[in-house]
Image (cartoon, rainbow, N blue to C red):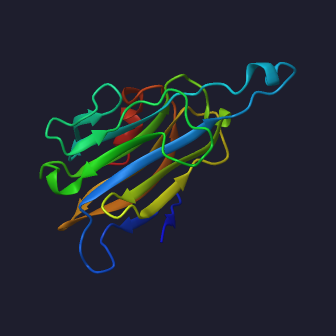
């Protein structure tokens, strides 16, 4: 059963049988909002390039970023499936995904922050049906979903973070709007959530 996450909500990533997850996928999906006005039918919807990134931290120090120009972490534990430049057709599937093999994440990495940014610079007011979700990659079960709703004048979102807690991992929904076309633009805002 999926949990619809609200800002600041935390969930445990332990399974109901007491075991822990071994592999998760962060999925990002969206579609462009239709244009308005006289020429809207001729022009069609605007193409919007949202990008998913995973920022790996050791304490408060950034160690590595997995994103469309660096698809796999150096140790292979985090992998981006590839860049989607236009979003989906509204079918609800993931347009970009980041896979995390939790058992292979080096011990010094204690936080993984997931961000979304509008590389083409459109605001989230111009994006429809945008969501971020976390899936148990082993079973395909959706564990949590965060919906980007209400549009807004921002171009980025600090979505959620995975963090070590004792012997396992926890998920915290952050849902913090931000401004920036790249993950580098978001680093000062991300720092407040470490």
x then y, percent, for residue 103: 17, 57
> What residue is rendered at 39% in x and 43% in y?
97
Q: Is residue 87 above or below residue 27?
A: above
Q: Residue furthest bottom?
A: 17
> What residue is rendered at 35% in x and 51% in y?
25
Q: Is residue 182 visible?
A: yes
> What residue is rendered at 48% in x and 45% in y?
94
- Count of number-bearing discs: 0
Left-right relation of 128 to 164: right
x then y, percent, for residue 176: 50, 46
x then y, percent, for residue 26: 39, 49
Q: Is residue 8 visible?
A: no
x then y, percent, for residue 93: 52, 47
């Amino acid at each position: 059963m999926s949990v619809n996450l609200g800002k600041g909500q935390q969930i445990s990533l332990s399974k109901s049988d007491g075991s822990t997850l071994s592999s998760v996928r962060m999925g990002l999906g969206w579609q462009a909002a239709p244009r308005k006005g006289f020429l809207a039918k001729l022009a069609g919807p605007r193409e919007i390039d949202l990008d998913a990134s995973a920022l790996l931290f050791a304490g408060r120090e950034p160690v590595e970023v997995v994103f469309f120009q660096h698809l796999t972490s150096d140790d292979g534990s985090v992998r981006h499936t590839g860049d989607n430049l236009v979003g989906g057709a509204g079918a609800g599937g993931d347009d970009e995904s980041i896979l995390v093999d939790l058992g292979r994440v080096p011990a010094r990495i204690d936080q993984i922050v997931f961000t979304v940014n509008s590389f083409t610079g459109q605001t989230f007011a111009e994006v429809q049906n945008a969501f971020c979700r976390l899936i148990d990659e082993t079973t395909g079960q959706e564990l949590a979903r965060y919906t980007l709703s209400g549009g807004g004048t921002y171009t980025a979102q600090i979505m959620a973070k995975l963090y070590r807690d004792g012997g396992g991992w926890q998920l915290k929904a952050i849902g913090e709007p931000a401004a920036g076309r790249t993950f580098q633009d978001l680093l000062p805002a991300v720092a407040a959530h470490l």
